[in-house]
Image (spheres, grey):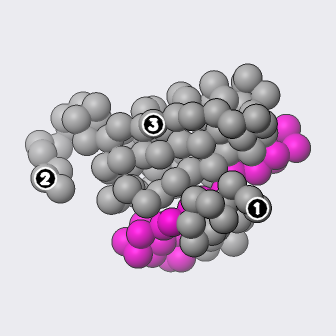
Amino acid sequence: MDRGVVGTTGRDRLSVAVRRQDHCAIFTPVGELDHHTADLLREPMEAALDEGHVKLVVDCSQLEFCDSTGLNVLLGARLKADAAGGAVHLAALRPIVARVFEITGAEAVFTVHDTLTAALDG
């Protein structure tokens, strides 16, 4: 994916589909999650928690890149979900994104699933 000019807005580099199912909210970020795009995921995750959805599932199958800002969005959502008695589940991490979690040790604080179906069942 063409990263474009540094400092460009995120809307052309990340889209986030959101759907709700019972007590669960499912997020599918497509593209690059970084400093310029983080709010596109942060805002709907916070809204879902505010609405009472305590299980947040992030389908990472189409996430092509995640930097430390993106990781912090997910960690922040995990803390808020945990405080509400819920959790953040990650599904279908691509190797390049999984590597960020591995290097930082963040994989230890998330429930990670091979597939979206497994995350929804778990």
The percent coordinates of residue 37 (x first, y second) are 36, 38
Q: Amino acid at mark 3?
A: Ala
Which numbered marker is on residue 2?
2
Residue topped by disc 3: 17
Q: Position of residue 81 (x, y in %)?
A: 76, 42
**Nearer to me, 114 or 94:** 114
Query: Could you tell whether 64 is left or right of 17 in the image?
Result: left
What amino acid type should be assigned to the residue bearing mark 2? Answer: Asp
Q: Nearer the viewer, mark 2 or mark 1?
A: 1
Lower sequence index among marks 3 and 1: 3
Residue range highlighted in magenta: 81-104
Residue 30 x %, y %: 36, 47
Q: Which mark is residue 107?
A: none
Q: CA distance from mark 2 to mark 1?
A: 35 Å
Give x and y (percent) for residue 48: 66, 29
Q: Which of the numbered marks, if any, corresponds to residue 122?
A: 1
| Labelled pair 3, 1 in contact (Cβ < 8 Å) | no
- Could you tell me how far apart the alpha carbons at marks 3 and 2 are, in whole angstroms? 21 Å
